[in-house]
Image (spheres, grey):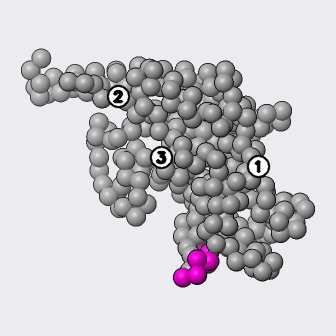
Amino acid sequence: MQKKKPIIALMYDFDRTLSPKDMQEFSFIPDLGIQDPDTFWDEADKLAKDHKMSGINAYMYLMLTKACEKDICMKYQNFVDLGKDVELFSGVDTWFERINNFAEKKGAIVEHYIISSGLKEIIQGTAIAHHFKEIFASSYVYDTDGIAVWPALCVDYTGKTQFLFRISKGILDINDSTVNDYMHDDEKRIPFHNMIYLGDGFSDIPCMKLVTENGGKSIVVYKPDTNMDTAKELINDNRADFMSSADYSKGTRLETLVHNIIDSMIASDKLYKAHDVSVKRASDKVEN
């Protein structure tokens, strides 16, 4: 009987993790005639505070109202087109195939997921969208004319954690409530100890902590040639396991780090399976 290959999930935030700045700052905000992106984000923050809104709801609402002020009705394709202008960190364009090939040679399967508070529609328009098994991110509802009118999903920093459980259990449909049903660890499609989470800051803490506390690994990345204050803080506070420059190029520290983690997870997976066999033998469930 052929042994089942372990599946390892690489899960990424998007803004400032795979891309050097917030996705709205590449073309959406400049197209509004706003020179300084902070002007937009400050207005979104004020909107959230004044109306006791989620910060995610606030920026999604503000995007639509600002577009309307310019007589732009934002449709799905408008958002997707914005994704074409999104820049990526060095090496990201070839990262996924390199990691997949490395894992395959070692006898494992890697799946890539996005868990982001950014916009799913914009991410879907990027050159790397096809590499992800699923993109969990904020998105809009569209009316009969195809115009965005209301948030369909708002993914805030605590809400991100639900997607870890969905990935683990293989229940990716966000409307499937069976994700709350009990599932024994050895039944989970991707156990937490086979998870790697990459993020850049404080909004990633809940996911990083949950992954780490359950045997997985978390990596905080920082923009090359900038200060590492946030990354240092997350490491010092035991929020993340590792820190690295967000350079995804071949042979970099980040690639080597992920290779080593994958090697470790493949070895650990064998031990977890051996442990399960021992437990079953101890329970007289197997004869040999």
The magenta stretch is 144-151
* Residue 285 vertical position relative to residue 179 in the rendered view, above or below: above
Residue 217 location (% of width, % of height): 53, 32
Q: CA distance from mark 2 to mark 3?
A: 17 Å
Q: Is residue 142 left or right of residue 282?
A: right
Q: Is residue 106 located in the magenta-colored stretch of the structure?
A: no
Q: Which mark is residue 21?
A: 1
Q: Which mark is residue 36?
A: none
* Residue 177 figure quarter: bottom left
Q: Earlier in the sequence, mark 2 or mark 1?
A: 2
From the viewer's side, name the closer residue of 128 and 53: 128
Q: Which residue is mark 2?
A: 5
Q: Which residue is mark 3?
A: 133
Determine the secondary structure under disc 3. loop
Residue 274 location (% of width, % of height): 28, 21
Residue 58 location (% of width, % of height): 69, 70
What amino acid is at disc 2?
A: Lys
Determine the secondary structure under disc 2. loop
Residue for point 67% across, 20% down? 251
Residue for point 11% across, 28% down? 285
Q: Is residue 246 left or right of residue 111?
A: right
Disc 2 to disc 3: CB gap under 8 Å: no
* Residue 252 figure quarter: top right
- Residue 152 visible in the displayed image: yes
